Image: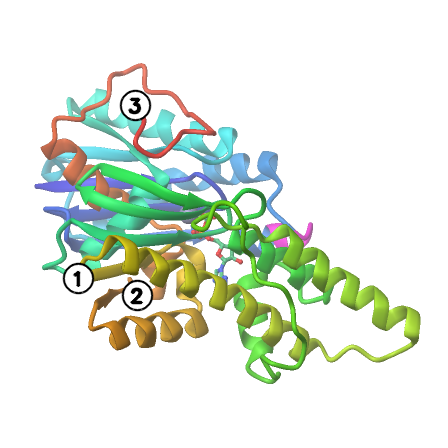
Amino acid sequence: MKILGIESSCDETAAAVVQDGRLVLSNVISTQIPIHTLYGGVVPEIASRKHIERISFVVRKSLSDAGCSLDDIDAVGVTYGPGLVGPLLVGTSFAKALAYGRHLPLIGVHHIEGHISANYIENKDLTPPFLCLVVSGGHTHLVRVRDYGAYDILGRTVDDAAGEAFDKVARAIGLGYPGGPKIEKKAKEGDPFAIDFPQGKVSDHPYDFSFSGLKSAVLNYLNMCEMKGEKVNDADVAASFQHSVVSTLVGHAMMALDEFGGDTFAIAGGVASNGAFRSAMEEACKKRGVRFSCPAPILCTDNGAMIGAAAYYDFKKGNVSGWDLNAIPNLKLGER
Ligand code: KG4
Ligand code: ZN
């Protein structure tokens, strides 16, 4: 079964053809990062317009890269939430028109479910149950994947998402948008133990995360240095901040493994492309004799292939959407 997966929830216009949920035949991503960099973050109205301009071309290219035409496509999967409403509407409207016009099933996909499903592409033999940490610009969710499409949320961020913290700290030290890759690069020149930043924990909810305190601690540190006339070592700030985020994420992940068991731990989302995070998770899982699954970096940041993979398992469960499918900016995981 070949599914065309479409993703447009934020600043990537993406489409892919995926066979049987696991085999990526094409994966086209048109990023708007250079445009939004001018403004220091994603401007929703501009993002919507750029999606409109690009979506036709991106879908056509995903078909030609896969060596197929619309005649070969069996279903259309599309992200319908959560995300920015304008960008989501562009993707859902396009997918609805295409599926209706071609008499194809339409499958609305939850964006986080898409991120988790990138692991099925990376590891062809991975099957639920497993634990997964989804860390992106909009989400930080610790999830128990009971079955395809069946999730228990063990913990989530109560304020900023991990990627959001990377973006805000990067802006504060003048690295620009998107912050994650820039902090990672800068951190390579710094000492992760130079500054003792707090962990992103929530005291009475052990599986929840809170990164706004850490972000404030970094901002306070920068202000304090300025007041004292001390020169800030940006690389040390980046390395120490990254170290704090990574140890919080790994700490929560291992606590969940200790309590819930299982033989596999997966990561997903844009922050999962961070090398320091990937290697810390790999080492911690190895120590416990647990299999570690992480998608290739290109499948961690937003893409259409993960949506095609998730759509396949939704379809197999009979979850086909109606023509009234709408964009839902605050869609909860596990809701339809
Ligand atoms: O999954 P994604 O592409 O979009 C959302 O669903 O949010 O994630 C984007 C987020 C941004 O906050 C970006 O700074 C972060 O992922 N990110 C990273 C890295 N690459 C992207 N964070 C840390 N290290 C990276 N290498
Ligand atoms: Zn995402």
Q: Which amino acid does label 1 sit on?
A: Asp
Apparent side of residue 37 relative to residue 243 in the rendered image (left or right): right
What residue did someone put label 2 on?
Answer: 296
Q: Distance between the residues labelled 1 and 2?
A: 20 Å
Q: Is mark 2 on a helix, strand or loop?
A: loop
Q: Residue furthest top?
A: 324
Magenta-span inclusion, residue 211:
no
Foreground residue, 82 or 241?
Answer: 241
Q: Quadrant of residue 72?
A: top left
Q: Which of 76 and 239 is in front in this view?
A: 239
Answer few, some or many: residues within 10 Å of disc 1's Cα (few below 14, many 20 plus, some between 14 and 19): some
Mark 1 or mark 2: name the one nearer the start of the chain: 1
* Residue highlighted by disc 3: 97
Numbered tag placed on residue 263 in the rendering:
1
Q: What residue range appears in magenta?
A: 36-40
Kindly identify the amino acid type of the residue bearing the numbered disc 3: Ala
| Residue 35 visible in the shown view | yes
Q: How crowded is the residue under tag 3: few (<14 C-alpha within 10 Å), some, or many (20+)?
A: few
Asked whether, in this view, residue 62 is left or right of residue 228, the answer is: left
Q: Going 28% across and 43% down the picture, which residue do you hit? A: 307
